Amino acid sequence: MQRCLHESRKDESRAVDDASSAFIFEGVINNKMNSPEIKEFIRENSSLFWWIKEGEKENISMEFLVETILNYGDEKNVKKLFELVGIDRVAGIFYKQIAKRRVNYFPQVVNFFNLYFKKNAHGSINR
């Protein structure tokens, strides 16, 4: 009886681990293929995605890419992101992300890009 109980707890523990892994990667891994240019950009900034397996880095979602570059990238990374994706699309992703209950951006990043996109992104006039 005790052995069955112990095995049952092991199975529950595995289920919790699997569920938390799925939660961690929800929204991070992209179901769509990124363009070759985006993949190259991700490879160039691979160190920003240190916790993602090498084989999965090129398939991160656009939302996660934008969040990571705006939070941790330098001005050259941000400029390249705007060139590859477009400032209006980046602004749209940013505004969707900061409208959520939980925001993963640093407060200074939210403030800076909120001001920046209001001035420079055409699709964000009413924000």
Image: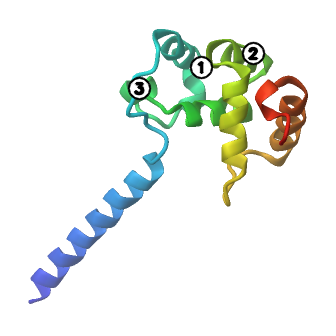
Secondary structure at numbered mark 2: helix
Label 3, label 2: how far apart the Cα atoms are: 24 Å
Dot 3 or dot 2, earlier in sequence: 3
Label 2, label 1: how far apart the Cα atoms are: 13 Å
In front: 55, or 4? 55
- Name the amino acid, label 3: Glu
In front: 14, or 123? 123
Residue 45 — which label? 1
Quarter of image, res 111: top right
Quadrant position of the N terminus in the picture:
bottom left
Q: Which residue is mark 3?
A: 54
| 37 relative to 46, above or below | above
Quadrant position of the C terminus in the picture:
top right
Dot 3 or dot 1, earlier in sequence: 1
Q: Residue at x 32, y 57 (%)?
A: 18
Secondary structure at numbered mark 1: loop
Is 10 left or right of 54, judged from the image as shown? left
- Name the amino acid, label 2: Lys
Dot 2 or dot 1, earlier in sequence: 1
Q: Residue 77's spot in the image, x, y percent?
A: 71, 18
Is 99 left or right of 109, judged from the image as shown? left
